Image (cartoon, grey):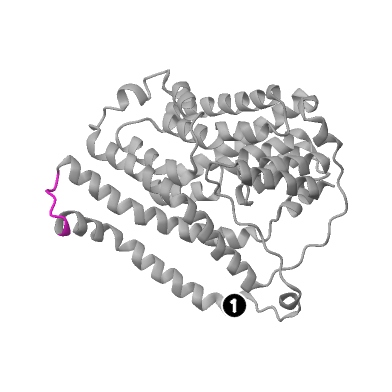
């Protein structure tokens, strides 16, 4: 019954969805022929992987000189002018971000082939609330789920007996602390900011789940979701390495193929900020000394919808023009972790008091993080 409900909800979500989803592509089970075939190990593909990684690195290293040549050599723009700076930023950042995305999505796509929704549900079922919240937040980083997957997963978690707080720890972590954001932050800003983002997002997920668990708000779950029962599930077939590599390839084609428009738009906005916003201007209303900048950044970001790939180039430009790190992180987290489409999707299975409580707890956590890092950084 549960699998039928999930299939129905997923079908409805696909028919009603108007936003771009950056989840992984559906996992296709192997055929009987492939399951019976020999299963070559990863060592067979290691030389090809090393060769591909070397080629990727050579292309990545050549982006800076090539972007300067295109801007000032091929296009003949005058160095130092605002338009020239914007064009150089745009020409450099687009292939840089897309290269990072391609590598990360491919590798994580292979990792995701080990974490199907049913396996994730089994891992979380029966765990104590505190241990379950930690495990749920960790699984949210590496599993192929975002806000568009909330309904079927929420039904599955509830009917499997997963505590409500554990479920919400997962729902906070999955879209906010995702691997694409972490690797792009590492590539664009370095390991310190990536580690800050990871640790703060993880803490917000834990605290939000713990608070919702303490509030005992199970009464706001739609009755039909609570009445669903979990039946026996069939054993999951084991994938061969060719199938896992194909899973990663399909993830690249699906995810990068969908988000490249958002990446381009985000970098375009970032290029405009980089080229035309005077240095230090943003410090006057997004700097450390402006006490109201963090909550305003969260209020502005919450109604917006974007994935990490689209918002990070804007974050990079804002930081470069004097915006405070805490304010920018708060804006980024609110765009990714709190959104109108998420509320619409969650309303299918939970009622507004629980949705508003969830969003309120996450928003307060983001504001606290923003103030904290404006104070210490």
Image-quadrant location for residue 165:
top right
Name the residue located 76 percent from the left edge and 66 percent from the top edge: 237
- Is 84 on the left-hand or right-hand side of 171? left
Q: Which secondary structure is most common in the magenta stretch?
A: loop
Q: Residue 34's image quarter?
A: bottom right
Residue 309 position within the rendered picture, expressed as x and y whole percent measured from the top left: 45, 47
Q: Residue 73: image x %, image y %?
A: 15, 59
Residue 95 visible: yes
* Dot 1 crowding, Cα within 10 Å, few <14, some 14–19, many 20+: few
Residue 287 visible in image: no
Left or right, 158 with reference to 176: right
Instruction: Look at the numbered disc 1 and give the secondary structure of its residue.
Output: helix
Say if 95 sits above or below 140 in the image.
Answer: below
Which of the 4 image quadrants contains residue 293? top left
Q: Residue at the location (50% across, 44% down)?
A: 195
What range is drawn magenta here? 74-80
The residue under label 1 is 43
């Amino acid at each position: 019954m549960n699998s039928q409900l999930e299939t129905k909800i997923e079908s409805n979500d696909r028919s009603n969805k108007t936003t771009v989803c950056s989840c992984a592509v559906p996992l296709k089970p192997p055929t009987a022929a492939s399951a019976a075939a020999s299963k070559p190990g990863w060592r067979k593909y290691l030389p090809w992987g090393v060769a591909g990684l070397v080629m990727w690195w050579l292309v990545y290293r050549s982006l800076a000189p090539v972007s300067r040549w295109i801007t000032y050599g091929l296009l003949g723009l005058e160095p130092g002018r605002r338009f020239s700076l914007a064009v150089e930023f745009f020409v450099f950042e687009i292939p840089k971000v897309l290269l990072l995305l391609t590598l990360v999505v491919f590798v994580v796509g292979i990792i995701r082939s080990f974490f199907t929704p049913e396996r994730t549900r089994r891992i979380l079922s029966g765990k104590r609330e505190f241990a379950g919240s930690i495990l749920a937040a960790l699984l949210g980083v590496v599993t192929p789920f975002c806000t568009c997957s909330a309904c079927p997963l929420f039904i599955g978690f509830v009917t499997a007996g997963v505590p409500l707080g554990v479920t919400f720890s997962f729902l906070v972590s999955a879209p906010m602390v995702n691997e694409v954001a972490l690797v792009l932050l590492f590539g664009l800003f370095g390991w310190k900011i990536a580690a800050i983002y990871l640790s703060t997002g993880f803490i917000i997920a834990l605290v939000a789940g713990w608070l919702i668990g303490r509030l005992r708000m199970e009464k706001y779950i739609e009755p039909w979701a609570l009445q669903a029962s979990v039946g026996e599930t069939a054993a999951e077939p084991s994938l061969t390495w060719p199938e896992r590599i194909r899973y990663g390839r399909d993830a690249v084609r699906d995810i990068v193929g969908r988000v490249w428009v958002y990446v381009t738009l985000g970098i375009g906005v970032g290029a405009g900020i980089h080229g035309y916003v005077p240095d230090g201007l943003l410090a006057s209303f997004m700097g450390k000394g402006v006490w109201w900048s963090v909550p305003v950044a969260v209020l502005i970001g919450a109604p917006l919808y974007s994935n990490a790939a689209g918002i990070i180039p804007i974050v990079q430009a804002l930081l470069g023009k004097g915006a405070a790190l805490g304010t920018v992180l708060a804006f980024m987290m609110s765009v990714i972790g709190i959104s109108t489409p998420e509320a619409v999707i969650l309303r299918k299975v939970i009622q507004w008091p629980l949705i508003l409580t969830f969003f309120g707890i996450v928003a307060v956590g983001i504001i606290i993080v923003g103030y904290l890092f404006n104070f210490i950084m």
